[in-house]
Image (spheres, coloured by chain):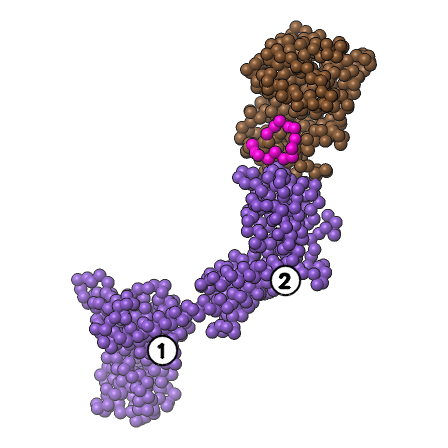
Chain colours: A brown, B purple
Amino acid sequence: MPEVRSITADHFDDLFLGSQLGVLSAASTYRGSLETWVHALLQERPVELVDPAEARERFGEEEMGLAVLMVGAMLSLLEYPFRGDEAVVAVRRLERTLGVRFAAMCPFNCSGPNALVAVGAASLLGLPLVDCDGQGRILPLIDQTTFALGGLRASPLAGVGPWGDVITVDSPGDRAEEIVRAAVSGAGGWMLCATYPAPVHRLVETGIQRSLSQRIASGALMQTARSDLGERLARHLGGRLVARARVVELSGHQHTGLRTRQPASPYSILLRGLSSTEPLIRLEVRNEIVVATVDGAVVGAVPDMICLIDPLRRRSVELSDLRVGQVMEVLVLPAAEAWRTPSGRAMAGPGAFGLSWPAQPA
Amino acid sequence: MSPDERTPTRASRPEGRPEAVTWGELLRSKPMEQVVVPVRVDLDRDVTKVRLISDLDDMQACRPGTVAVLQPPLASAAWAIEIAVRYAWERSARAVVAQVTGSAAEAVTRLAERLSVSVGFHDGDPTELALDLSALVARPGAVRSGLLARCAVLISEATSVEEVMTVLAQELPRTATSLRGPGDRLLAGCGDELPPDVLRVPLAPLDVEAGRSLTAALSHRSVAWNQTVTRVLQIARAQVVACEASGRVAASVQHEREGFALARVLAAPPDSGPATALGWPLQGPLTGAVVLPLEEAVRAQPAVGLSLRAAWAAEPVGAPPAPYLDGWALWAQLEEPGADPAEDHGRAERALAARAERLVRRAGLGVDLRIGVGLPGSLAATLEQAMIAARAATATGSVRGIERFSTLGSRELVTATDAPHLRRVARETLAALLGVDDRDDLVRTLLAYLDCAGSTSRAAERLAVHRNTVTGRLDRVRRLGVPVDDPDRSLELHLLCHVALSSGLTG
């Protein structure tokens, strides 16, 4: 796979497919206003993708960067679509608040809509996009990032809603998540936010490197692979295919576990393996899949990424698309090293999702 | 797993320490009544500990033989319960008890079945359940006392041997219990073959019958469990005997009542009150039969009557066998009369004879019983005829064991009137003839000669011998002083020959 130095409209399909990997609840497997907007922008102005190693040389110690993301329910984009200037308004507001000019930006994460939002914003603003992100996967909270693990703060933060409402959050107590979440409901269901203002060097140091280019490469693989998609993806991303199985039950339940800040309601997906022993596979969902068991043995848990791949349609599957009887491939992809530290596990491990979890899973 | 983590074996258990309670025993305890246990395995394995599990770390620390009672929120999360079941399987824990229902419980049950791990569900307080179970595990004697008390209550409520055996089957996990007669003949309970080390509690000295015992084949053996099962069987023994005694007394009273009722009907036909109360058929032509033991010592024995009555209950047609003289009478009304009364009578006789034969077979007493069947008519008349036929069946040694009055010839009729007396007369009158070695040939030849009205050629034909043989044998009979040619003694001689042959005096 050749190194991507510039993201063009030709990369859009790969980026779109690759960004859906491991996203169960916040995915969008059809193209809506956001996708149309980003695709149109790339046709006019490709985005320069800066490798992290190059970023350390290219940007000075004082040069600032930021991350952009969408907060809220993606389905509300159907009712209140993108206008197109939200990223400019949010970034400029943050520049005015801080009194700086941003030299570069990066995705908040490379999963689902946020990968596209970052590419679109960079194109619109004419800023280079640094090939790193703050999660390496999708996690639901603004402060659930390796940026935060590395000491960066989400605020000051500027957000723009579908009606053009702009909020600026400066939270000395790191309560940006709670404040933005409350503002989103009043704003119309979603907000595009400019956040984590920090020197570019610090974003690179604390972020998960080369995550965007990896997603583009994964998307390319998904377009070319045939019957062995799950195995090839696992090989490519250093993970493993744990099961090929048929969905037997989809059920919501009341078990909320320990008290958490997670906005998700619990959900279980039960599958029956297609191998001769027909093992029972359970995927426990809190927005995304947080635990996978095979016959009660834990085969994957957050912060590792557990993906459901549809081998027939050769793409990732979202929850609303899942039906009993469908055959799925279950992949477990390893989390970035930053998540494997004790503080990383505390922030993004099973405990962060309210699951009572053994210190050393079997 | 390190050696010290293994379930203690019975051989390695320190002396003086009570044997641990088994999972099967714990399942029968009162605290577990509130727990639904869809997957039950390793019932005969020890429970070493009961742990209240609040997180999966606790579950990881479980030792072999532990019963894990999950606490909320773990107890209601299917994903966590499944992980706990897996840990239980990996650690040889005895069981996992959780608090889910519906499809979540079904999924957990499926996994538990796959892994062969006992799993239970309840909606009570897990802390209370764990404490109660812990107390029982700490004091195994309490579990066993509880089981004994529970069995005692349930057995005392049983009103039949079958109910007692059902209680034993339900309350003694993985133990095959049965009631056995002499030679280990199965009388009630589990019909499996008895292993050599079967536990046995004889019903004697309480039992009126010899050689019966309650048995228990154990799937696992230990001193404590053997003692517990033995005690339960001892409790059951008294109830088995009591249930049977109660049944016997009731049957005996009923039998006597029936004997009295029959005597009243026969003595004073208008006084049919007691018989009517019993619902007996008394109207219209009746066909009677009498069952009479061959052996005189057994006649009129109540035990035989009770057995016949119990056998009659399996095919309760007509009147039950009621005591009648030194035998037992039964009778039935004519079914749907046809155009030909003679044919009806014949059919009724044959039907009753067949039913009486089935009755005797079913009773299976090991005593030779003979049957006589009377002609249809009044009850008194048909039973009288039936008794004569029955006596004929006993006196003549009928091969089938049954005689119908309608087919008795005059000789058998005479024979039946007083067989013992006639045998004595025959022995005395034919003493010389019966004293020789070839007496059987001689008596048969004499009988054939008399049957054939003094024709030696026809007698030879009947005996399939040469005529000279017949004349030679008759000469020998005459030489022994038998008055063959005296017309005044011809009838007497003829009858006594029949008696001698049928009574085995020539054998």
Q: Nearer the viewer, residue B459 or A36?
A: A36
The extreme top residue here reads A44
Task: Give the label on residue A223, or none.
Answer: none
Q: CA distance from mark 2 to mark 1?
A: 50 Å
Which residue is identified by label 2?
Answer: B224
Q: Nearer the viewer, mark 2 or mark 1?
A: 2
Q: Residue at x 24, y 81 (%)?
A: B452
**Residue B186 appears in the rendering:** no
Q: Is residue A281 left or right of residue B321?
A: right
Residue type at mark 2 is Ala
Task: Locate the C terminus of chain B by quadrant.
Answer: bottom left
Query: Magenta segment, which residues?
Result: A252-265
Mark 1 Cα shell of 10 Å, populated few (<14), some (14-19), many (≥20)? some
Q: Secondary structure at mark 1?
A: loop
**Is residue A254 shown in magenta?**
yes
Q: Nearer the viewer, residue B232 or A324?
A: B232
**Residue B102 appears in the rendering:** yes
- Looking at the picture, how far across and down is residue B264, in whole percent? 26, 75
**Is residue B38 shown in magenta?**
no
The extreme left residue here reads B339
Q: Main secondary structure of the magenta part?
A: loop
Q: Residue at x 79, y 18 (%)?
A: A202
Do dots 2 and 1 share one subunit?
yes
Q: Residue at x 57, y 19 (%)?
A: A75
Q: Secondary structure at mark 2?
A: helix
- Looking at the picture, how far across and down is residue B475, in whole percent? 30, 90
